[in-house]
Image (tube, helix red, strand yellow):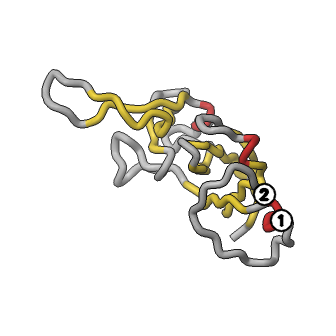
């Protein structure tokens, strides 16, 4: 599994995205309410650059005639044909069991830890920090 330092937490505030290329693969890095997610920037439908699509929410299950909107900032819509995917899992909103986008593990490490040579394996845990490096594992 490759380890890639892709930026600092300060460079990617909540609600933003960053398009990067890692190991010759296009990847979109998203900050969803302070949690970082990375997914392949290729729509499985026809190969569109998925991560440049609109980031939005969706209607949630509700009673007839009632419309509840939620999950704001957690859904990305393909710019070519409108297919929607969950940024947190990579699964399709339409068919989550058969259609998905490749996701990658993301960790946030303190600056000193990120500067350690890539050969050193670091066990990470979900944390919330205000500064530090964003790391994507492929």
Q: Quadrant of the N terminus?
A: bottom right
Marks 1 and 2 in Cβ contact (< 8 Å): no
- Left or right of 113? Residue 129 is left
Q: Residue at x 54, y 28 (%)?
A: 54
On the image, numbered disc 2 is attached to which residue? 5
- Give how far across and how far down residue 96 sits, in percent: 36, 49
On the image, numbered disc 1 is attached to which residue? 112
Q: Residue at x 46, y 41 (%)?
A: 85
Q: 27 or 4, which is in the foreground?
A: 4
Secondary structure, mark 2, is: strand
- Left or right of 16? Residue 95 is left
Check the image and name the residue furthest to the front. 130
Q: 43 or 71, which is in the foreground?
A: 71
Q: 1 or 95, which is in the foreground?
A: 1
Q: Residues within 10 Å of mark 1 (few under 14, many from 20)?
A: few
Q: 70 or 25, which is in the foreground?
A: 70
Query: Would you place residue 32 above or below residue 72 in this image?
Result: below
Query: Would you place residue 137 above or below residue 35 in this image?
Result: below
- Give how far across and how far down residue 99 sits, in percent: 41, 49
Q: Residue at x 54, y 42 (%)?
A: 33
- Give how far across and how far down residue 92 sits, in percent: 41, 44
């Amino acid at each position: 599994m490759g380890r890639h330092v892709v930026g600092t937490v300060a460079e990617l505030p909540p609600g933003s995205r960053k398009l990067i290329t890692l190991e010759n693969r296009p990847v979109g890095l998203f900050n969803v309410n302070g949690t970082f997610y990375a997914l392949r920037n290729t729509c499985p439908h026809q190969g569109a650059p998925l991560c440049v699509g609109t980031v939005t929410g969706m209607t949630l299950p509700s009673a007839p005639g009632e419309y509840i909107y939620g999950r704001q900032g957690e859904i990305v819509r393909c710019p070519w044909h409108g297919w929607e995917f969950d940024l947190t899992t990579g699964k399709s909103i339409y068919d989550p069991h058969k259609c998905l986008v490749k996701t990658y593990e993301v960790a946030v490490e303190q600056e000193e830890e990120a500067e350690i040579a890539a050969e050193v394996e670091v066990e990470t845990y979900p944390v919330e920090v205000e500064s530090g490096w964003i790391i994507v594992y492929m």
